[in-house]
Image: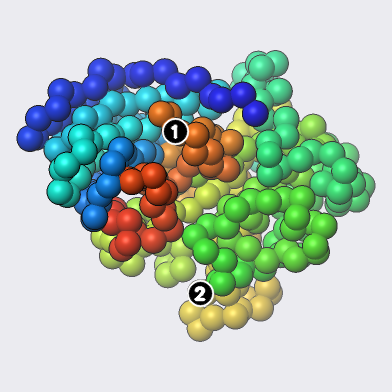
Amino acid sequence: MKRRIFLQAALAAPLMTGWSASSRATPIASNEGWRTFEVITKLEIAEPGSQTRAWIPLPYAASTDWHKPLGNTWNGNGTAQIVIESRYGAEMLYAHWQDGINTPIIEVISRFATRDRSVNLSTPDPRIPSLSQSEIKRYTEPTELIPVDGIVRDTALNITRFAQTDLEKARAIYEWIVDNTFRDPKIRGCGRGDVKTMLETRYLGGKCADLNTLFVGLTRSVGIPARDIYGLRIAPSQQGYKSLGLGSTNASKAQHCRAECFIQGFGWIPVDPADVRKVVLEEPPGNLQTDDLKVTTIRKQLFGSWEMNWLAYNTAHDVVLPHTQTKLAYFMYPNGETGGKTLDPLDPEAFRYSITAQQIG
């Protein structure tokens, strides 16, 4: 696949003992419902070799009615710059260090505001703008792990055979995933999102990047634009779900993928069938039945709304990291290389990195 073109969005800070820079910031127009958060990502790469470098996801660059970026600052003992992936607009901080530095360090401080998100699905609104043809193409086309033909389309057609509208089709796919999949705690990280393999093997267990990507693939295959949004849990659930929030300020293993589909007259609709299965498995006392009130309540909510104790990073697939040949199915974790070896992004203790999150202001 042709390598993605990455555009530099900020000049590299000069190499010095300490350096810092910041990206653009967007003011909040209204305080209604908004909460401001700070996420700090810190890397201290142990036993560095030659060509040590790292790639750190930054908050979603778009300002929406549920998310506003408020800028990024960083400091450390190397050189860094913000780069933007050209197709999906994913922002990341690329850092690299001169050989011979005993402990390459970088600390990135990101601030942003969020508020809970909900879409009224009772009546379409003709004032909501349509997607452009290029956006429709982008969010209905296949990726390397998300085909939209063959078994994926056949499965989606069977699921939606009684649905008349795109909204009914999307909801049917959502309900099918909740009913037929399960959260597999043995999967590392958030899973791979290999939709075809899941359907061919009939093993429908996984984590958020598996189950929500399955929603995206099935929905795209019947012509409805859909996308994953990769991000991070940043605070406890205010709805009382222990399994759907951050239990402390330590967010190093709190990555979470969500999904959206676009329906004309409603816009982008937030969904999260994976979190319904997470509640089934993990919400105390655990292994709940699907007719448990906790499950039925969250099942209804997560087609059309999100609790925004969560930071969105990007919607990018098939990401080729700049200045390397490393290609990722998605970009949700810090990534790094040193001495010709790839650091394990799913093992923050060995990598070493830490992510902390807290509400501020």
Considering depth in this image, is 197 or 327 the residue closer to the camera?
Answer: 327
Give the side of residue 161 with respect to residue 24, left or right. right
Q: Quadrant of the C terminus?
A: top left
Please state the total of marks drawn on the protein image: 2
Could you say whether the residue bearing mark 2 is in a helix, strand or loop? loop
Q: Disc 2 and disc 1: Cα gap in Å?
A: 41 Å
Asked which quadrant contains residue 61, the reply is: top left
The picture places residue 10, in percent across and down from the top left corner, at 28, 19
Name the residue rendered at 61%, 70% in the picture: 184
Residue at 35%, 53% in the rendered image: 234
Q: Which residue is mark 1?
A: 324
> Disc 2 or 1, which lies upstream in sequence?
2
- Look at mark 2 in the image and give the residue it sits on: 283
Residue drawn at (36%, 38%) of the image:
55
Q: Answer left or right for 203 relative to 262.
A: right
Horizontal and vertical percent for residue 20?
15, 30
Residue 174 drawn at (x, y percent): 71, 52
Q: Residues within 10 Å of mark 1 (few under 14, many from 20)?
A: few
Looking at numbered disc 2 in the image, what kind of residue is underneath it? Glu
Q: Residues within 10 Å of mark 2 (few under 14, many from 20)?
A: some
Q: Amino acid at mark 1?
A: Thr
Which residue is at the front of the view, 236 or 151? 151
Above or below, comparing residue 147 to residue 30 in the picture? below
